[in-house]
Image (cartoon, rainbow, N blue to C red):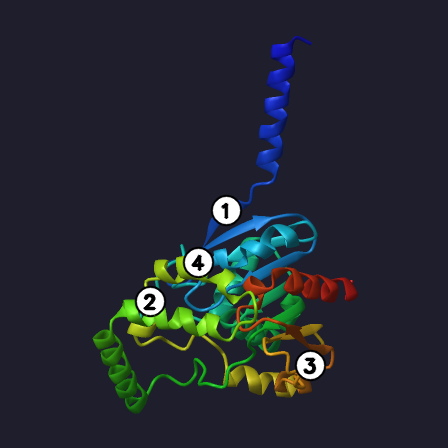
Amino acid sequence: MTRIGILCFFIGWIMCSSCTNQANIGYVPVSGEGKIYYEEKGEGEPLILLHGHSLDTRMWDLQFDEFARHYRTIRMDFRGYGRSSKQTETFQFTHLDDLLAVMDYLKIEKAHIVGLSMGAFVAGDMVAMAPHRMLSCVMASGGIRSVQGPSAPMGAEESARRDKEIAELEAKGIDVYKREWLEALISDGGSRREEMREPLWQMINDWDAWQPLHKEVRMFWAREAWKRLEETCPSVPTLMLRGDAKGEGKPYSPKELKYLPNGTALLLPDCGHMMNMEQPETFNRAVLKFLDGIK
C-alpha cells in the first residue's frame, strides 16, 4: 500500500471511530403536539438521566460518556427546558407521562432511572406510579414531592398567590433572579463548588425562565404518588443520595425508604445539591456500584 493509501486508510479509520463515539440525537413526539429532545449513546441495559430545574441535558456531561461505557444511556430535556417544547398554562401533562412516551418511542420496556433534584421528583413519581417500567431507581437531592397532584387543579387562593409571586419576580428582574438561583445552587456545596459555576451559569443563562413567570399545571404526581407508594410498597431496587458538604455525617433516612423494601440511602462527602457536577467521580462510582450490585 502506498503512503497516500495508508494515510487515507488511517484518516478513514479515525473518522469511523469518531462516528461510533457520537451520540444519536432526536425528538420524541408527545401529547399536546409537544416534542422531547433526547441523546442516546452506548449499548446494554437502558439507563435514563433526568435533569434538574432550570437546567438541561448538559447537566450530565460528566456522566453521559462514563455511563455509556456500561449502559445504553439516554439523557433528555424535560418539556419546558433545553431543546424540548415549551410549556403552557393550559395544557395538562406530567413529566412522567413524557418520560414514558420517550421510553415507548425508543422501544424501552424497562430502564434504570437516575434523577437529580427535579429529576428525582420524576424518578420518585415513576417508582410509585409505574414501577413495572423500572429496572432500578436513583434519586439524588430529592424524592417524591409533597404538593398537590394533577387531580387537584389550582384554586383561586393559590392562583392569587402565584399572581403576587410573579409580579414580585417581574419587579426584581429575571436576570437578578437567575443570579440568585445560581448562588443558591452553589452555596451549599463543598470544596469544589466553584468548579460548577461556569457550566451551571451557561445552562441557567440559556434557560428562558418560563416556569417562575407563569402558572404551571401540575407536572408531578406528588401526593398522589405518595398515596400509591404507601399502598403498594414497590420492590424496585432504589438508591437515594444526599450530599454532605459539611462532613457532619448526620443520619440520612428519607421517608420514601419506609415503603421501598429494596431501597437504601447514602451520603456523598464534600458536595451539596448538585453532587453529580461537583464530585462527578464520587457520584459516578456510587451509581455504578449500586447498579452492579443488582445485576
N-term-proximal mark, 2 vs 4: 4
N-term-proximal mark, 3 vs 4: 4
* Mark 3, residue position: 260
Residue drawn where x is 63% and y is 70% of the image: 138
N-term-proximal mark, 3 vs 1: 1
Q: Nearer the viewer, mark 4 or mark 1?
A: 4
Residue 12 in view of the camera: yes
Q: Nearer the viewer, mark 3 or mark 2?
A: 2
* Mark 4, residue position: 198
Q: Is residue 229 left or right of residue 153?
A: right
Q: Amino acid at mark 1?
A: Ile
N-term-proximal mark, 1 vs 2: 1
Query: Could you classify mark 3 by the number of other residues whose Cα lies within 10 Å: few (under 14), some (14-19), or many (20 or more)?
Result: many
Mark 4, secondary structure of its residue: helix
Q: Amino acid at mark 4?
A: Glu
Name the residue at the top extreme: 2
Q: Amino acid at mark 2?
A: Ala
In the drawing, what numbered circle is on residue 25? 1
In the drawing, what numbered circle is on residue 209? 2
- Residue 136: quarter of image: bottom right
